Amino acid sequence: MKIFHGPYETETAVIAELRRREQSRESAPNGAFTIRAACEARGIELGAYDERIITWLGGMSAQTSEVVADLIRRAYAAGRRDERADTALAGGES
C-alpha cells in the first residue's frame, strides 16, 4: 500500500493531490497536524523544539505541509526498504 504521494515536481502537482483528497487551501487540515501525524505514525519522538518548528511549518500553505509530511513518509519507507535489503544481503529473514 502506497502511503505517500510524491515525489512532487511542481506546486501544481501538490495542489492536485490535495484536491484529489478533497482538500483545498481553505479546507485543508491544520498543516502542523498533518506533519505531526506523519511523524507520530512512524514512531518519531518529538521534542519541544521539534514541536515549535512543526507549528511554524504548519502555518505555511497546505502544499508546504503536505510536501514536508510526504518527505517524512517517503524517507521512512526508503529506510524500511534499505533495512530489508540489508537483511536479505546478510542472509536473514525480512
Image (cartoon, grey):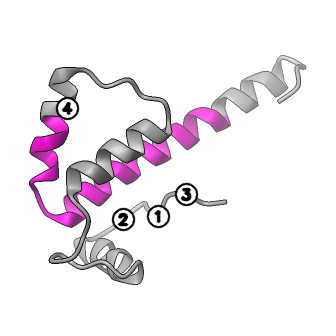
Label 1 and label 3: CA atoms lie apart by 7 Å
At 60% across and 60% down in the image, what residue appears? 2
* Magenta-drawn segment: 53-81
Give the residue type that dot 2 points to. Answer: Tyr
Q: Mark 2 touching mark 1, by CB under 8 A?
A: yes
Q: Which residue is mark 1?
A: 5
Q: Secondary structure at mark 4?
A: helix
Give the residue type that dot 4 points to. Answer: Glu
Q: Which residue is mark 4?
A: 51
Label 2 and label 3: CA atoms lie apart by 14 Å
Q: Which mark is residue 8?
A: 2
Q: Secondary structure at mark 2?
A: loop
Label 4 and label 3: CA atoms lie apart by 23 Å
Give the residue type that dot 1 points to. Answer: His
Q: Position of residue 63 (x, y in %)?
A: 23, 65
Q: Which mark is residue 3?
A: 3
Local packing at callout 4 (Cα closer than 10 Å; few below 14, some 14-19, many 20+) is: some
